Image (cartoon, rainbow, N blue to C red):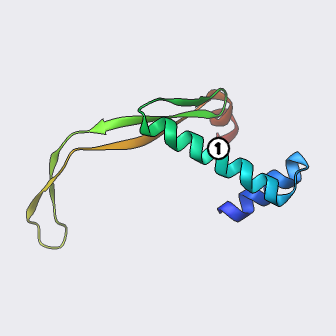
Amino acid sequence: MNKAELIEAIASDAGLSKADSKKALDAFITATTKSLKKGDRVALVGFGSWSVSKRSARTGRNPQTGKEIKIPAKKVVKFKAGAELAGVIK
């Protein structure tokens, strides 16, 4: 499902116009992004939670040449599915 399909699904399920659904989705994405950028955790009970995790620097290997390369430390976003979502997927 891409963004346009998600907007259409939200509009039909919630009885909103596509324009209002797009505004709501964009607001959710913006608020979530800002929160994660501050290092906060975003949780939707039953659905899941997003958090920022630090990944330490490590040594990797270039698959084409086999030469070792240094991969720098960075922050990554992690998603953990909630109990309800995990139960539906099984």
Residue 73 picture location, percent across and down: 21, 44
Q: Residue at x 59, y 33 (%)?
A: 48
Picture residue at 78% right of the left edge, 53% below the top = 21
Could you say which quadrant of the image residue 37 lies in?
top left
- Badge 1 marks a residue whose secondary structure is helix
Residue at 69 percent of width and 50 percent of height: 25
Q: Considering the image in quadrants, where does the C terminus appear?
A: top right
Q: Nearer the viewer, residue 76 or 20?
A: 20
x and y, in percent, of residue 62 in the image: 16, 65
Count of numbered circles in the view: 1
Please give the residue where the numbered disc 1 appears in the rendered image: 28
Q: Residues within 10 Å of mark 1 (few under 14, many from 20)?
A: few
Seen as rendered, the residue at the extreme left is: 67
Question: Would residue 72 be seen by someone viewing this image from the given angle?
Answer: yes
Residue 57, picture quadrant: top left
User: Which quadrant holds the N terminus?
Assistant: bottom right
Please provide percent x and percent y for residue 42. 55, 32
Residue 66 image offset from top left, x and y in percent: 11, 67
88 or 56: nearer the eye?
A: 56
- The answer, for residue 1, to whether it is visible in the render is no
Q: Looking at the image, which residue sits at the far bottom?
A: 64
Horizontal arrangement in the rendering, residue 85 relative to residue 56 (left or right): right
Instruction: Describe residue 78's horizontal placement relative to residue 12 as left or right.
Output: left
- 59 lies left or right of 53: left
User: Which amino acid is tagged 1?
Assistant: Phe
Nearer to the camera, 68 or 30: 30
